[in-house]
């Protein structure tokens, strides 16, 4: 205990140096924690589940995928044939239709964009990843929103960030004008509430009936001309499957279904679909994993090595005095390593906690591309930070600590004399 | 603890040399010395005569090139670094010219430092620290850090640290070299008192003639050889 107090006092003896070293550690651990959080998130979403997995059906060749609406029925049954033995049906399914509009069609600024996924309200809490596993108050809120959507087809359930960007409040009405392929599809929505799951903070959910009815009514006001999106209004279909065997069978059924040939479709697991999407960012991810994170770790070790080396050099006389008093070389080694460990692990733990609080609570997560929505820093960041701080400080202080244990008393005092 | 002839320290035919670049400097040359238990021995000599080297050899801080150093029944010159460290904790108290107290620790904690290496309870440690600090007259300064004490007071703390483990031998390397005349007198009085009341064997290296006269026996070291003075 007394030895530990000596370690603490030594760390506190030069507050400016300790604080600057700790600040360096905090910044670098922050970067490492954010990088690892993103990589961990991507790893989770691209790891295949064994059971209760979701498959995604999209156009095989065209991005963005656009499928005819009459694909819904065969896909909802996994293109199974009741007369064929061994065919498997999905446990559940959900269609996604995207809609993109702007709050101000004259000013196509990012803050005015509204991206909505049109879906069957009843599927929101049964099929949406993350929303199907809510508990407590969040689950109650999700159920309330689903009921409200069923009651009001103009209802829009918004992501937290979207609501903030729109500068609107729950209960208010918003007019959205379609842009791009959705031109001339204008809606007036009522904001029903906020999606209680951070990964959907940047998107909105609307009733597919509302979109379909508007598309169907379009010819009546446009000389019988169909809207551009009318025939291929389905973007993708999600299927819930019991296990990997069911997925393999359903994928085979869909591949061989004659009614799904024009256009041809592909059926893949969500994880593999995300993986394929991430292929475009392969080099970036490789750089994060193998250059940025290790670079930060090495820099962190060097920062620590520099600070501890200066510390040991300044205290050679003191270390020699401790040897005179009877302290063994290994005890001096532990003393220096302990100081470094305390500083590194302390700064790392603080940084891990800070990263968790700032990213999750202040920034509301790290926004990622496409389906990924928001990436949150996991609670594991607390021990990541401490472990990274401890490991890098140990690595950085090994040489200075060895030099401290090897102090030659007679040489040190000869120089003093 | 003493040898057959009653000596607590026996230095037998010790030689020590150092390298300065490519040159070899002989510091001690076939030196022999006996120090009886309870003696206050003064060592004088010009700079570079080998006084501190001899002190370091006796205190187990360095090893001779030739010869043997015995303290009590222990052959110090043959011990490993780890054995020497353990031995020093129990048997040698060191008083430095520049005190060398740890600035982050209070007077109490500085004196307690060597005791942390011994199997003592907190209560036993406290008792020994307080006894040592009372002996040097600083029981009322236990919470002061070195920076808050005068040079004389710091040296007293240094002496308390040297005697707190009740060592066989106290070695003092110019303990008055950094002090004003009055503080130096007080420190020398204290060392004499330690010899009288605690029967400590004291080896004192000094340039100071006032310090030298306090020693019971005074040796002069010149060109690596000892010369006894009247």
Image: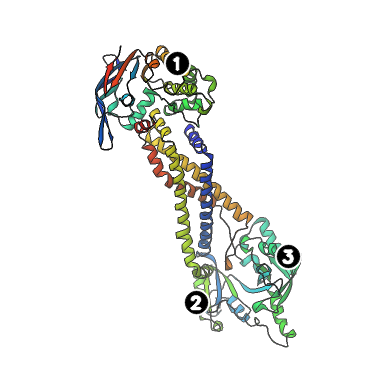
Q: Going by the picture, which residue comes out furthest to the bottom? A: A223
Q: Could you tell me how far apart the alpha carbons at marks 1 and 3 are, in whole angstroms?
A: 90 Å
Q: Chain of mark 2?
A: A
The residue nearer to you, when weighing B16 against A379, is: B16
SS assignment at label 1: helix
Q: Which mark's residue is nearer the viewer, 2 or 1? A: 1
The image quarter containing residue A233 is: bottom right
Q: How is the image coloured?
A: rainbow
Left or right, B209 with reference to A60: left
Query: Mark number for residue B185?
Result: 1
- The reply to whether residue A106 is in sight is yes
**What is the secondary structure assignment of the residue under circle 3?**
strand
Label 1 close to label 3 by CB (< 8 Å): no
Q: Which structural element holds mark 2?
A: helix
Residue B73 visible in the displayed image: no
**Chain under numbered label 3:** A
B217 relative position to A270: left or right = left
| Residue A370: quarter of image | bottom right
Q: Quadrant of the rendered structure where residue B119 is?
A: top left
* CA gap, disc 2 and disc 1: 102 Å
C-alpha separation, residue under disc 3 versus residue under disc 2: 40 Å
Q: Which mark is residue A192?
A: 3
Q: Report how many numbered discs are placed on residues in the image.
A: 3
Same chain shared by disc 2 and disc 1: no
The disc label shown at residue A252, or none: 2
- Please state if A295 lies on the left or on the right of A219 as rendered: left
């Amino acid at each position: 205990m007394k030895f530990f107090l000596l370690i603490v006092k030594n760390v506190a003896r030069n507050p400016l140096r300790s604080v600057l070293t700790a600040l360096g550690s905090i910044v670098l651990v922050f970067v490492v924690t954010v990088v690892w959080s993103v990589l961990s998130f991507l790893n989770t979403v691209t790891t295949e589940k064994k059971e209760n997995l979701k498959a995604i059906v999209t156009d095989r060749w065209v991005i963005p995928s656009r499928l005819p609406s009459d694909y819904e029925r065969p896909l909802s049954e996994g293109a199974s044939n009741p007369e064929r033995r061994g065919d498997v049906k999905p446990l559940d399914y959900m269609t996604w239709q995207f809609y993109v509009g702007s709050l101000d069609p004259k000013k196509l600024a990012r803050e005015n964009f509204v991206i909505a996924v049109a879906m069957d309200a009843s599927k929101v809490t049964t099929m949406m990843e993350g929303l199907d596993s809510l508990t407590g108050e969040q689950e109650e809120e999700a159920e309330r929103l689903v009921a409200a959507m069923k009651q009001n087809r103009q209802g829009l359930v918004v992501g937290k960030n979207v609501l903030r960007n729109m500068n609107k409040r729950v209960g208010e009405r918003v007019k959205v004008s379609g842009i791009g392929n959705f031109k001339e599809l204008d809606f007036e929505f009522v904001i029903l509430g906020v999606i209680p799951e951070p990964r959907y903070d940047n998107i909105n959910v609307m009733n597919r009936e509302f979109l379909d009815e508007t598309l169907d009514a379009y010819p009546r006001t446009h000389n019988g001309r169909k809207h551009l999106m009318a025939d291929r209004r389905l973007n993708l279909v999600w299927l819930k499957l019991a296990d990997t065997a069911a997925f393999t069978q359903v994928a085979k059924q869909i591949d061989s279904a004659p009614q799904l040939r024009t256009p041809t479709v592909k059926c893949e697991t969500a994880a593999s679909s995300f993986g394929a999407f991430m292929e475009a960012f392969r080099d970036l991810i490789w750089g994060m994993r193998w250059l940025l994170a290790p670079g930060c770790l090495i820099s962190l070790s060097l920062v620590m090595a520099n600070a501890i080396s200066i510390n040991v050099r300044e205290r050679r006389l003191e270390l020699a005095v401790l040897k005179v008093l009877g302290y063994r070389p290994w005890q001096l080694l532990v003393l220096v390593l302990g100081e470094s460990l305390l500083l590194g692990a302390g700064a790392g733990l603080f940084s891990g906690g800070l990263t968790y609080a700032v990213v999750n609570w202040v920034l509301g997560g790290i926004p990622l591309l496409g389906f990924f929505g928001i990436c949150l820093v996991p609670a594991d960041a607390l021990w990541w930070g401490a472990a990274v701080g401890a490991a890098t400080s140990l690595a950085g202080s090994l040489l200075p600590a060895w030099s401290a244990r090897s102090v030659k008393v007679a040489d040190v005092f000869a120089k003093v004399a | 603890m003493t040898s057959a002839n009653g000596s607590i320290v026996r230095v037998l035919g010790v030689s020590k040399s150092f390298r300065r670049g490519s040159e070899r400097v002989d510091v001690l040359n076939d030196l022999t010395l006996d120090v009886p238990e309870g003696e206050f021995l003064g060592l004088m000599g010009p700079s570079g005569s080998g006084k501190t080297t001899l002190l370091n050899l006796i205190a187990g801080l360095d090893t001779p090139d030739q010869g043997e150093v015995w303290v009590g029944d222990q052959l110090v010159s043959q011990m490993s670094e780890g054995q020497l460290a353990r031995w020093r904790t129990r048997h040698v108290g060191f008083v430095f010219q520049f005190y060398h107290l740890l600035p982050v620790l209070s007077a109490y904690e500085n004196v307690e430092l060597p005791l942390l290496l011994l199997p003592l309870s907190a209560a036993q440690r406290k008792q020994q620290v307080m006894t040592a600090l009372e002996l040097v007259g600083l029981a009322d300064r236990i919470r002061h850090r070195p920076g808050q004490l005068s040079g004389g007071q710091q040296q007293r703390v240094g002496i308390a640290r040297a005697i707190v483990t009740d060592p066989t031998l106290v070695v003092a390397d110019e303990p008055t070299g950094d002090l004003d005349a009055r503080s130096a007198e007080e420190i020398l009085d204290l060392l004499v008192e330690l010899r009288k009341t605690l029967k400590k064997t004291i080896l004192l290296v000094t340039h100071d003639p006032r310090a030298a006269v306090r020693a019971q026996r005074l040796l002069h070291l010149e060109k690596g050889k000892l010369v006894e003075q009247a």
